């Protein structure tokens, strides 16, 4: 019983680490469920998916790409810290945003939404385990 809780906790930690590294949250959650604390070690060792992390950072509006060297810079930056070029301010980039509207329908789930789902199922599973134990 305690072992199951440990595996469940491992799975959740894996999901959080994976999410921060731009990795597959649900995949790592399942791996954590299967191999428990060992999965945390793997999750910590595995390399960060820089591309996804950058995309998330751009989507959240905290960063953007330097038009000269394509490195990630702060949204408020007026000078690139990587190549030293003067970059247009956010007011300009606001105008460069695509004008088209997204087709109607549910928006794709963000990483944090996936984490909430994973967290919910973790709690559900703990609830079921506790229920079984006290039967
Ligand atoms: Zn640059």
Image: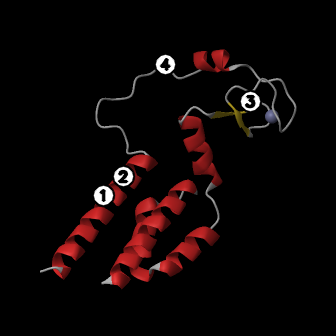
Indicate if the residue with disc 3 has its beta carbon within 8 Å of ligand 1.
yes
Left or right of 28, for residue 90: right
Q: Quadrant of residue 127?
A: bottom left
Which residue has dot 4 on it? 99
Residue lying at 17% horizontally and 74% vertically, measured from the top left: 131
Residue 54 image point, x, y percent: 62, 45
Whether residue 98 is situated above or below residue 116 in the rendered picture:
above
Residue at which label 3 appears: 67
Residue at which label 2 appears? 116
For marks 2 and 3 on the same chain, the one whose residue lies earlier in the sequence = 3
Residue closest to the far right: 84
Q: Nearer the viewer, residue 123 or 42?
A: 123
Q: CA distance from mark 4 to mark 1?
A: 36 Å
Which mark lies nearer to you, 2 or 3?
2
Q: Residue at x 61, y 57 (%)?
A: 49
Tag 2, which secondary structure? helix
Mark 2–mark 4 distance (CA, rounded to whole Å): 31 Å
Label 3, secondary structure: give it: loop
Q: Label 2 crowding class (10 Å Cα cut-off): few <14, some 14-19, many 20+? A: few
> Residue drawn 39% across and 28% down?
102
């Amino acid at each position: 019983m305690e072992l199951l809780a440990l595996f469940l906790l491992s799975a959740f930690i894996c999901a959080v680490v994976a999410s921060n590294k731009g990795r597959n949250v649900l995949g790592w959650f399942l791996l954590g469920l299967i191999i428990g604390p060992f999965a945390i070690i793997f999750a910590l060792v595995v390399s960060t998916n820089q591309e996804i992390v950058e995309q998330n950072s751009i989507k959240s509006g905290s960063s953007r790409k330097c038009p000269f060297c394509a490195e990630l810079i702060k949204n408020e930056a007026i000078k690139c810290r990587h190549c030293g070029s003067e970059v247009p301010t956010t007011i300009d980039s606001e105008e460069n945003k695509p004008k088209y509207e997204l087709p109607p329908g549910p928006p794709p789930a963000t990483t944090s939404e996936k984490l909430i789902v994973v967290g919910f199922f973790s709690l559900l599973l703990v609830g079921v385990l506790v229920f079984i134990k006290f039967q």
